[in-house]
Image (cartoon, rainbow, N blue to C red):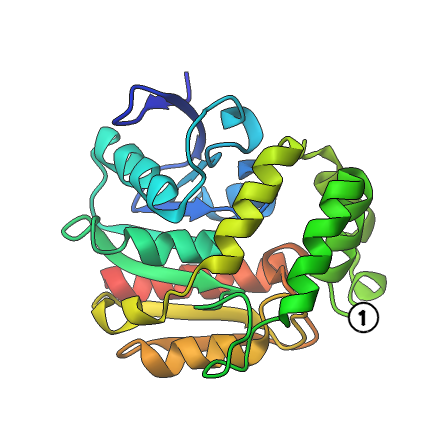
């Protein structure tokens, strides 16, 4: 059964496909492991693909307790330890990239590389970081969730993609059905995770990333701005970056074949 027990004695869900070097994929806000459908299909022939449902999300939605990044990161470290994984490549998307950065130090010795997908070290802008969303946008997201979580998520799903991106994607209807099939967390969990994301500032962690890292982002991301991905590349020693032209926040969906090829190339370069 794909459940594991964390250090608090709580049971959380994960999905697993394939064999080989382990790739642990961490989803974003209001999503679940199901969002990695095209990575399970495209990478499992070469790698062992593992994707947890974060606490409060997916099948782990009954886990109580704080939805802080330290809690998320502890859960992730517990999964990797329980499965006794080594030479792990940790891939985090959006909020999942924050969690990957938070967990990096705790996973020392088990981690061989990291992929930060549509990521930012700070979700909201500040006087010394101009590449985040305006405070009023984050506040607007919170108000929308409070009023009607269903409508708020429909709006969020729309913003995931660049203008015209879905019209040009042959998998657009399939991707829409996939996103609609992911049950959202309850409103309280959605708001708590959003507040955690809005408060977070991961810039102080970047100098301590000492594993090979690749930054993967769309050129037209409206949620985690492309400039934020470039900032990560410039502030993580030795990091490389791959930009997906015309893509928004989820290149692993609309350009899954190219994305999988690029992630595979990175993993093989580490283990060569």
- Which residue occupies the foreground of this view, 172 or 184? 184
Image position, residue 122 (x, y; %) = 47, 68
Residue drawn at (28%, 24%), measured in percent from left and top?
8
- Which residue occupies the foreground of this view, 121 or 214? 121
Q: Farthest residue in the left direction?
A: 109
- Return the residue at label 1: 163
Can residue 46 be seen here? The reply is no
Name the quarter where the C terminus is drawn: bottom left
- Which residue occupies the foreground of this view, 112 or 27? 27
| Picture layout, residue 115 above or below residue 28 | below
- Which residue occupies the foreground of this view, 231 or 176? 231
Residue drawn at (20%, 34%), measured in percent from left and top?
84
Residue drawn at (37%, 65%), measured in percent from left and top?
202
Image position, residue 214 (x, y; %) = 39, 69
Q: Farthest residue in the top direction?
A: 1
Q: Count all numbered tags in the image, as a single digit.
A: 1
Where residue 207 sits, quadrant-wise, is bottom left
| Picture layout, residue 116 above or below residue 25 | below
Badge 1 crowding class, 10 Å Cα cut-off, few under 14, some 14 to 19, many 20 or more, is some
């Amino acid at each position: 059964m794909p459940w594991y027990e964390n250090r608090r004695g709580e049971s959380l869900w994960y999905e697993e496909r394939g064999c080989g070097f382990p790739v642990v994929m961490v989803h974003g806000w209001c999503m679940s492991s199901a969002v990695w459908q095209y990575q399970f299909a495209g990478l499992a022939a070469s790698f062992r693909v593992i994707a947890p449902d974060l606490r409060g999300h997916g099948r782990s939605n009954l886990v109580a307790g704080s939805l802080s990044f330290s809690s998320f990161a502890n859960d992730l470290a517990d999964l990797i330890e329980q499965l006794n994984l080594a030479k792990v490549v940790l891939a985090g998307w959006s909020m999942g990239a924050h969690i990957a950065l938070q967990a990096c130090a705790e996973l020392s010795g088990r981690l061989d590389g990291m992929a930060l997908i549509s990521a930012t070290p700070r979700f909201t802008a500040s006087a010394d970081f101009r590449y985040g969303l305006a405070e009023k946008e984050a506040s607007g997201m919170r108000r929308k969730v409070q009023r009607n979580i269903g409508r708020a998520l429909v709006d969020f799903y729309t913003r995931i993609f660049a203008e015209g991106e879905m019209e040009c994607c042959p998998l657009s209807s399939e991707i829409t059905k996939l996103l609609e099939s992911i049950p959202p967390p309850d409103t309280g969990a959605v708001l708590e995770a959003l507040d955690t994301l809005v408060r977070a500032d991961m810039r102080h962690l970047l100098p301590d990333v000492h594993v090979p890292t690749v930054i993967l982002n769309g050129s037209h991301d409206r949620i985690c701005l492309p400039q934020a991905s470039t900032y990560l590349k410039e502030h993580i020693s030795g990091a490389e970056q791959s930009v997906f032209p015309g893509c928004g926040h989820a290149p692993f969906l609309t350009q899954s074949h190219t994305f999988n090829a690029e992630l595979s190339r990175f993993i093989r370069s580490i283990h060569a």
